[in-house]
Image (cartoon, rainbow, N blue to C red):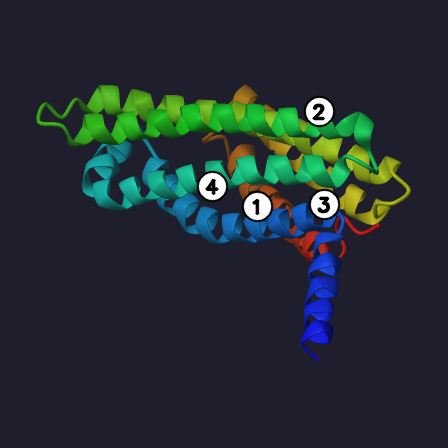
Amino acid sequence: MTLSRSTTASDATAAVDQRPPGRRAAVVTGAALLLMALVAIPANLVVQSALTGEAPAVAQALTAQEAALRLGVLGLLTVAVLDVVVAWGLGRVLATPAPGLATLVVTLRLVYVAVFVVAIALLLVAVETASSSTGDAPAAVLAASAFSACWRLGLVVFATHLAVLAAAFVGAPQLPTWLGLLLGLGATAYAVDGVVRTALGADAALATGLVPVVSACAAVGELVLAGWLLTRGGRR
């Protein structure tokens, strides 16, 4: 009886260990994407609400909302760390069905993370400058503007990452084409938003009108990708 139980336990452990590495990576990646959504939404709301408006309003918000903005910085840093996990996981998931694009997907996501971290550092500089004893409002607003510009450029890199990821899904027979098309829609939305904001300015009417469209495309694409990774991703 003891030998039978031992054999059964060993067989169960072996079955778990024999799960495809891509499947384990898919589950981790899907969970990371869901956690990113939970953290990113409130952090983005705090940051964007404080940095919207003319320079005097932004300077006042940087001082009045210091505590909330510091929490926003921590939230964005958490998202950046989770993005690294997602980059690793996508590389593992795509290694077999789309080996030619897997490395490029990972590289572009990590480049985006690097730009994103620089933007977060600029936001922290803005908060620190506004809350310092000297209270240099013009310098704080300048750092906040640099944060927004850096983030916009980062989102263009992210759009490129999504486009390559979409191409991997569309081109690999083992991956769902419909998900690739959905990711491609998100990439297009990010790219158009980044180009419009860079060309016309972040406060332009067209740029402002694109915000809900980009947010919807991003949310749907990321959440559907997370759901697929958790349920089907990495299976042989």
Mark 3 or 2, which is nearer the eye? Answer: 3
Q: Secondary structure at mark 3?
A: helix
Mark 1 or 4, which is nearer the eye? Answer: 4
In the rendered image, which quarter is residue 125 located in? Answer: top left
In this rendered view, identify the residue nearer to me: 196 or 32. Answer: 32
Mark sitting earlier along the chain (3/2):
3
CA distance for labels 2 and 4: 21 Å
Identity of the amino acid at label 3? Pro
CA distance for labels 3 and 2: 20 Å
* Residue identifier under label 1: 215
* Residue identifier under label 2: 104
* Residue identifier under label 4: 79
Residue at image coords 35%, 24%: 122
Would you say residue 192 is visible in this rendering?
Answer: no
CA distance for labels 1 and 3: 32 Å
* Residue identifier under label 3: 21
Percent position of residue 161, x then y = 67, 30
Query: Measured along the vertical axis of the image, is residue 46 above or below residue 201?
Result: below
